[in-house]
Image (cartoon, grey):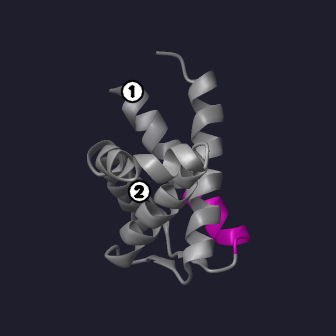
């Protein structure tokens, strides 16, 4: 449980930092960042595998780079229905999703199970 809360807080804090530096992404406070982190986690668990399977041919052709577009689409989708978490363009969503992915991967290296 502590591991889950730590990862959630890491994602929420990453979203707050991204909002400060990436144009086109706005988070109004810690609560919307926490809600966005939970929603992004749920979307990554439930929807992302289905999208990867559906887009497998293009993902193979692009050598996996299309997954970045899928992450951006999920990031933008999450922002579309969370109050206080706004993304103005698709490319801002792609950049934000890329940064969240990198920070999460690095954070998971240091967070012990």
Residue interval drawn in magenta: 14-22
Residue farthest along the bottom direction in this orientation: 88
Mark 2 lies on residue:
34
Assign a secondary structure to mark 2. helix
**Rendered image quadrant of residue 74:** bottom left
What residue do we see at 26% from left, 46% from top? 46
What residue do we see at 40% from left, 53% from top? 55
What residue do we see at 60% from left, 35% from top? 105
- Measured in 3D between alpha carbons, the distance from the residue under mark 2 to the one under mark 1, in whole angstroms, is 15 Å
Residue 2: assigned label: 1
Q: Nearer the viewer, residue 105 or 56?
A: 56
Q: Nearer the viewer, residue 10 or 72?
A: 72
Assign a secondary structure to mark 1. helix
Residue 100: assigned label: none
**Rendered image quadrant of residue 104:** top right
Q: Position of residue 106 (x, y in %)?
A: 65, 33
Crowdedness of circle 2 by 10 Å Cα count: few (<14), some, many (20+)? some
Q: Is residue 35 above or below residue 7?
A: below
């Amino acid at each position: 449980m502590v591991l889950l809360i730590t990862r959630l807080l890491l994602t929420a804090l990453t979203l707050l930092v991204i909002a400060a530096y990436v144009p086109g992404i706005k988070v109004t406070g810690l609560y919307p960042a926490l809600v966005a982190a939970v929603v992004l986690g749920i979307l990554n668990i439930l929807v992302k595998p289905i999208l990867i399977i559906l887009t497998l041919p293009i993902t193979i052709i692009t050598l996996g780079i299309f997954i970045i577009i899928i992450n951006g689409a999920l990031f933008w989708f999450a922002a579309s229905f969370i109050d206080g978490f706004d993304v103005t363009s698709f490319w801002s969503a792609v950049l934000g999703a890329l940064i969240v992915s990198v920070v999460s991967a690095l954070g998971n290296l240091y967070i012990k199970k």
